[in-house]
Image: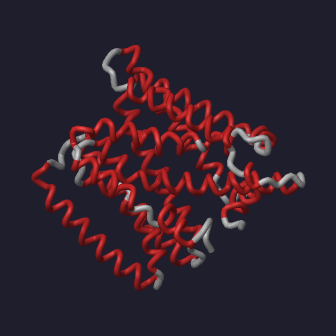
Amino acid sequence: MNVVSKNFDLFLIKFPIIFPIIYCFFLYTYPTTENFIIYLTILILAEPHFGATWPFFINSKNKKYILENKISLIIIPFSIVGFCILGFFLFLSFFLLVFFAANIFHVTRQSLGICKLYEQNKENIIYTEYLLYIFNLLFFLVGIFRFYIPIINDNYFFELNISFLVLFIVTFILTLIKYKNLESVLTLFTGILIFYPICFVENPVHAILMGVTMHYTQYLALTYKVTSKRIVNNQLSENNFDLKNIINYKFIFLLLIYSIFMTIFSFYGKNPAPYLKNLLLIPVTAQMLHFYIDSQLWKFSIKFNRENVLKYIFEK
């Protein structure tokens, strides 16, 4: 089954490797534009991906469900906001470490979820889960010891990357033998490779953004499909189907405004002036909420999510 089409799924969901390749090309070909590359990526991929959560969450169909689940969908999100405010102002270093860990865990869960969409074999799913958690835990530890507690320096660069290269090759061959399906292996390797730039990119922001462009693309592709199907189904139920109205221009406009403002906050949040630096709290808090809310909205063990999200993913 395909979400949209074979090529759409392959290049935007299963194996969108072209995006980190483009990022890497421009970063190392035009190194003086590295800040421009960061904020352009945030503007056109990162923040639209974060912003796309809110129409899913603040939806007329969700209102009753949210009120019925006040603890998980109201109290905990507000608690996360409180934690972000306290952490940002009182223990920033620890808070950033928690943010980094939450980021990796969130991305790993999405990678696993996408593998589950295309893979029905339970034994293969368990194998996939182990591999994703093991590799991303390794990348988390490398990130800690490269950027947070700098023990791994340039002296270990060659050995570190050769070790991972060997691991990748062995894992790829064994998984291909086990799955007997190249596209399934590529879907798994998207989740494995997302954080690999942590091992060779010097700037921690580029190290995260480069590979996570694949995560952003996957999410935008899936939310595009679900949102489009909801619009079509609503029109059909009202006997008011119009191909021209499938595109939700209001949603796109609001997403654009959201992305522009969040990118501005991120940009000025890098300023050492306290009144500007504090602006970074806004997008960081929104991202932490995104991590948590998505863990609830895409949990398909819940009947409500199966009926309001999952059923639209593969529906033609």
Residue 304 seen in this snapshot: no
Q: Is residue 250 left or right of residue 24?
A: right
Q: Residue furthest right?
A: 239
Say which residue appears at 36% left-offset and 61% top-offset: 193
Q: Is residue 280 above or below residue 28?
A: above
Say which residue appears at 42% left-offset and 51% top-offset: 213
Q: Is residue 119 left or right of residue 242?
A: left
User: Could you say which is closer to the camera, residue 245 or residue 205?
Assistant: 245
User: Could you say which is closer to the camera, residue 82 or residue 283?
Assistant: 283
Q: Is residue 239 left or right of residue 93?
A: right
Q: Position of residue 299 (x, y in %)?
A: 64, 55
Q: Position of residue 51 (x, y in %)?
A: 57, 39
Q: Is residue 210 left or right of residue 31?
A: right
Q: Position of residue 306 (x, y in %)?
A: 72, 59
Task: Find residue 90 and report its image quarter.
Answer: top left
Residue 1 seen in this snapshot: yes
Q: Residue furthest front?
A: 244
Say which residue appears at 49% left-offset and 24% top-offset: 85
Q: Position of residue 313 (x, y in %)?
A: 66, 62
Q: Residue furthest left?
A: 155
